Amino acid sequence: MNKLDICPQELFHQNSSKLIDVCINGINTKVLELNDNHGNYLAIIADDLKNPHGICGQFILDHWINEIDYDLYQDNVAIIKAYY
Protein backbone atom coordinates (compact mmCIF):
# COMPACT_ATOMS: atom_id res chain seq x y z
CA MET A 1 0.00 0.00 0.00
CA ASN A 2 1.17 3.45 -0.87
CA LYS A 3 0.22 6.68 0.85
CA LEU A 4 -1.33 9.52 -1.13
CA ASP A 5 -0.29 13.13 -0.54
CA ILE A 6 -3.67 14.42 -1.75
CA CYS A 7 -7.22 13.20 -1.23
CA PRO A 8 -8.56 10.83 -3.91
CA GLN A 9 -11.21 13.33 -5.02
CA GLU A 10 -8.46 15.87 -5.75
CA LEU A 11 -6.47 13.26 -7.68
CA PHE A 12 -9.52 12.51 -9.82
CA HIS A 13 -10.27 16.22 -10.24
CA GLN A 14 -6.71 16.90 -11.44
CA ASN A 15 -7.15 14.12 -14.01
CA SER A 16 -10.76 14.87 -14.94
CA SER A 17 -10.03 14.78 -18.68
CA LYS A 18 -8.86 11.16 -18.31
CA LEU A 19 -11.83 9.89 -16.26
CA ILE A 20 -13.72 6.94 -17.72
CA ASP A 21 -17.35 6.18 -16.81
CA VAL A 22 -17.89 2.52 -15.96
CA CYS A 23 -20.40 0.27 -14.23
CA ILE A 24 -18.81 -2.18 -11.77
CA ASN A 25 -21.07 -4.75 -10.12
CA GLY A 26 -24.09 -2.54 -10.83
CA ILE A 27 -22.45 0.61 -9.42
CA ASN A 28 -21.81 3.55 -11.76
CA THR A 29 -18.44 5.10 -11.04
CA LYS A 30 -15.42 6.69 -12.70
CA VAL A 31 -11.95 5.21 -13.04
CA LEU A 32 -8.51 6.30 -14.17
CA GLU A 33 -6.17 4.05 -16.14
CA LEU A 34 -2.80 4.41 -14.37
CA ASN A 35 0.40 2.46 -13.84
CA ASP A 36 3.13 2.12 -11.29
CA ASN A 37 6.21 -0.07 -10.86
CA HIS A 38 3.92 -3.08 -10.26
CA GLY A 39 1.94 -2.69 -13.50
CA ASN A 40 -1.14 -1.20 -15.12
CA TYR A 41 -4.27 -0.68 -13.05
CA LEU A 42 -7.64 0.99 -12.85
CA ALA A 43 -7.84 3.50 -10.00
CA ILE A 44 -11.24 3.53 -8.29
CA ILE A 45 -12.25 5.75 -5.37
CA ALA A 46 -12.66 3.28 -2.50
CA ASP A 47 -15.96 4.77 -1.29
CA ASP A 48 -17.53 3.75 -4.62
CA LEU A 49 -17.19 -0.03 -4.09
CA LYS A 50 -18.30 -2.03 -1.06
CA ASN A 51 -16.53 -5.30 -2.01
CA PRO A 52 -13.42 -4.54 -4.06
CA HIS A 53 -12.14 -8.13 -3.92
CA GLY A 54 -15.28 -9.13 -5.81
CA ILE A 55 -13.87 -7.53 -8.96
CA CYS A 56 -10.91 -9.92 -9.21
CA GLY A 57 -11.51 -12.25 -12.11
CA GLN A 58 -13.80 -9.81 -13.92
CA PHE A 59 -13.34 -7.89 -17.13
CA ILE A 60 -13.60 -4.14 -16.63
CA LEU A 61 -13.12 -1.95 -19.70
CA ASP A 62 -11.79 -5.02 -21.54
CA HIS A 63 -9.13 -5.54 -18.85
CA TRP A 64 -8.99 -8.83 -16.89
CA ILE A 65 -8.60 -7.81 -13.23
CA ASN A 66 -6.16 -10.19 -11.56
CA GLU A 67 -5.01 -8.37 -8.42
CA ILE A 68 -6.24 -5.72 -5.99
CA ASP A 69 -4.15 -3.30 -3.93
CA TYR A 70 -4.89 -0.02 -2.19
CA ASP A 71 -3.56 3.49 -1.68
CA LEU A 72 -4.07 5.17 1.68
CA TYR A 73 -4.94 8.76 2.48
CA GLN A 74 -4.78 9.82 6.14
CA ASP A 75 -4.46 6.13 7.14
CA ASN A 76 -7.71 5.16 5.40
CA VAL A 77 -8.14 3.17 2.21
CA ALA A 78 -8.69 5.82 -0.46
CA ILE A 79 -7.99 4.26 -3.86
CA ILE A 80 -8.61 0.72 -5.04
CA LYS A 81 -5.96 -0.33 -7.53
CA ALA A 82 -7.41 -3.00 -9.83
CA TYR A 83 -4.40 -4.45 -11.66
CA TYR A 84 -4.80 -6.00 -15.08
Image: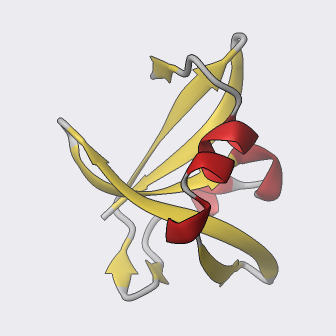
Q: Against 66, is 24 above or below?
A: below
Q: Position of residue 45 (x, y in %)?
A: 69, 49
Quarter assignment of residue 41 = bottom left
Quarter assignment of residue 31 = bottom right
Q: In what quadrant of the picture does the C terminus appear?
A: bottom left
Residue at x 68% of width, y 28% of height:
77
Q: Position of residue 38 (x, y in %)?
A: 21, 39
Q: Against 45, is 7 above or below?
A: above
Q: Position of residue 14 (x, y in %)?
A: 59, 47
Q: In what quadrant of the picture does the N terminus appear?
A: top left
Residue at x 63% of width, y 24% of height:
6
Residue at x 43% of width, y 72% of height:
57
Q: How many marks?
A: 0
Q: Position of residue 25 (x, y in %)?
A: 72, 78
- How does the figure colour the protein chain or chains? secondary structure
Residue 55 visible here = no
| Residue farthest to the top, as pictured | 75
Q: Against 57, is 62 above or below?
A: below
Quarter assignment of residue 61 = bottom left
Residue 25 visible here = yes
In the figure, is residue 23 to the left or right of 83?
A: right
Q: Against 22, is 53 above or below?
A: above
